Amino acid sequence: MTDAVVQLKDVTRVYGQGNVAVHALQEVTVEIYRGEFVCVVGPSGCGKSTMLHLIGGLDSPTSGTVTLEDQDLSTYSNNELSDLRLKRMGFVFQAFNLIPVLSASENVEFILQLQGVEPKDRKARALEVLDSVGLADAANRRPGELSGGQQQRVAVARALVGSPLLLIADEPSANLDSTTTRELCELLQTINREHRTTILIATHDSVVMSYSTRTIQLEDGKIRQADAA
Amino acid sequence: MNNFKLVLNLSLRNLWRQRRRNSILLVAITVAIGGVIVLNSLIRGMQVQMVDSVVENLSGHIKMHAPNYRDDPSMERGFVLDPRGVERAIEGLPVLGWAARISIPAVIMSERETRGATLIGVDPDQEHISIISRFELEGESLKSASDSRILVGRALVEELRTKLGRRIVITTLDSNGMSKEIGFRIAGVYDAESESFEKSLVFSGRNALQELLGSSKVTEVSIRLKTRYAQKEDFEQVRDSFLELDVLDWQQANPIVAFMYNTVNLVIYIWLGIVLGALVFGLVNTLITAVLERIREFGLFRAVGMRPRIIIAQVVSESVCLMLLGIVFGVTGSLLIFAWLHNGIDLSAFASGVEMMGMSSQMKPALVAHDVLVVVLVSVVLAVVASFYPARRAVRMNPLDALRH
C-alpha cells in the first residue's frame, strides 16, 4: 500500500482510430498524494481534462492503469464506479452545472440524498457546507438568481458535502473574474488545509496555479514537467 | 425512499419548469382519456339498450323451445307446458318471472290488405316480464289468457288499412299442420319504439289460441332474470332441467344481436388502442424534447454518481405524473359529461337507423367501472412504455459528451 491517493501508470488514451486517431494522453505516469493541492496545467488540448476524467472514472484508458487508493479502476463495474464517484469524489465543472429547478441548499443536499443520508442530517449538513463557502444567506435561491461566482461556490459546496477523498475541478475559474477566482481558490485552499481533502484542478489560469502545492505540466498528452511531491 | 422522494421532487419541478409545453400535452391527455371514457359510455349505453331491448322484446334471458322449432316454427313443434317443472328449474335463481307463449307464423288479412306476421299467444298475467305489459295502447289490452281478441301494432294496422274494433282474419297452421282461418276482433292498437316490431307481431290470449288451434301445447317459455345478464350457472341450471328441450340464452336466441354485442366489445378496445396509441407518440415526442433539453443535467447526474436506474426512474416518473394528472382531469371531465348526458341523447332524427339495431331513439350512456379502470391502467402502462425510449437515451449518453453539450 502506497500513500498515493491516485496513481496513473503508463496511461495512454487514444480517441478515434487510424488516420484520425488523437493521442490525448501518452504513457503518462504520475502519483498524487493525500492532502495535495495539485494543478494540471498546459495549453488547450494538451490532455488536462482527459487526465481528470480518467481519474474520475468517467473515461477509461486505452492502455495503462489508473488506481484510486491502490484499487485499479478498470476492475470496477459501471455501478461501482458510480458509487465511487458519489462517495469518494467531488466534481466541480467549468460551467457550474447546477440543477436549475433546485435551490442552492437542495443542489448541495441532493448528493447526500443519493448517499442515503437521513433528511434531518442532510439539511443541517448542506447548510453547514453552504455556510462554509459563504452562502448561508443564499440557501433558498435558485441557480438563476445567483451570480457566476456564487454558483461556482454552490458547486464547490456540492462537491464537498459528501466529504470526498478527492476533489476534481475542471477549469473551475474559466467563467469567473479574477476577484471571484481568488475567492474560490482561497476557499479551496482552506478546505485543503483544514480537511486534508486532496484537490486536483485542471487549469491554465496562473492565479489558480499560485495556490497549488504542486503542478503537473502537460504538453501534447505527455508530462513535460512535474514538481516533486 | 430517499431516492423516490428525490426522483418525484425533480420530476414535478421539471414538469412545472416547462409548464406551457406540458400544459398542452396535459390538455391532449385529458381530452383523449375523457373522450375515450365518454365515447365508451355511449357505446356501452347502446350495447346495454340493445341487450335490454332484446331481453324485454319477448326473448328473456333464457328461452326454451321444442327441438327443431327454430328451423320451422309451428304448433307441430310445440311442447306441453309443465309449470311445476319450470318452477323447479328456476328455484333459487334471481328470476323476475317467466311466460309461456305460442309463437307461430301467420297471414293476416283485413278487408283490403294481406300481410305476413307472427301470431303470439300470451298470458297477460305472465307478461310483466316483457314489453307487452308496457305497450302504449289505443283501445284495450288483453284481459286474460282466454281473451280471444287481438292486439295489432300501429304500423301493421296502417298497412292493413283497418282500425281498432274491426275484424281481421288470420291464417295459420294448427297442431296437425292443417291450415286454419281464424277471425279476431282488434282489441287494441299498440305503439312500440320499433316500427318493425309493430309490423311483425300480433298478440292474442294463449289459452284462446290453443283452443282455436285444437292443441294444449306452447311453443316457447321465456324466463327473465332480475339481473341484466344471465350467469352461466343460472343458465346451466335451467338447461339441465329440460334436457328434452332446446334451452337458449339470449345470445343464442338472437345471434345477430349477439354478434353486434360482441363486435361492440371489440370496437371499444380498438378505439381505445387508436386514441391512446396516438397519445403515446405525443408523449414520447415531449419526453425526448425534455431529455434533449436536459442533456447536461443528466450528464451531471451520471458524473456525480447517480445510478442509471434512478435517471430512468426520473424520466418515467415525469411521464407517469403527467399521465396521472391527465387521468384525474380526464376522468373528472368524463364524469361531468356523463352526468350532463345522463338523461340521454335524442336520436329521433335517425329513428329508422337506430331501430334496426334494436335501440331506442333516446341514447343513454352507461358508465362501466371496468371500462374506466381499463382506460386508466392502459394509460399508466403506456406512460411507462412511452418513457422508456427517452429514458434509455438519457442514460446511454456518455456523461462527458453530455456535460460538454
Image (cartoon, rainbow, N blue to C red):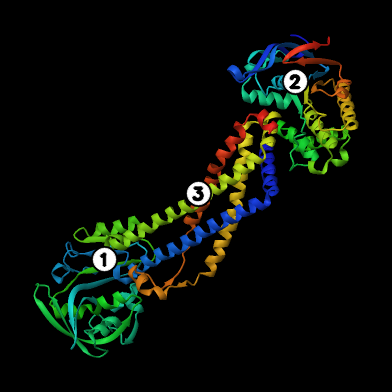
| Residue with the mark numbered 1 | B86
- Marks 2 and 3 share the same chain: no
Q: Residues within 10 Å of mark 3 (few under 14, many from 20)?
A: some
The residue at the point 57 percent across, 45 percent down is: B285
Q: Amino acid at mark 1?
A: Val
Q: Which residue is tagged 2?
A: A48
Q: Position of residue A29 (x, y in %)?
A: 73, 10
Query: From what the image shows, is residue A143 above or below residue B219?
Result: above
Kind of residue at badge 2: Lys
Q: Amino acid at mark 3?
A: Val
Q: Earlier in the sequence, mark 3 or mark 1?
A: 1
Residue at the (37%, 66%) spot, across then down: B50
B344 horizontally vs B354: left or right: right
For numbered disc 2, what is the local secondary structure? Answer: helix
Label 2–label 3 contact, CB within 8 A: no
Position of A140 relative to A111 (above/below): below
Task: Name the residue: 59% across, 31% down.
Answer: B396
Q: Residue under mark 1: which chain is it in? A: B
Q: Disc 1 on helix, strand or loop?
A: helix
Tell me the tag on residue B378.
3
Residue A95: x %, y % from top left: 76, 33
Instruction: State which quadrant residue B260 falls in.
Output: bottom left
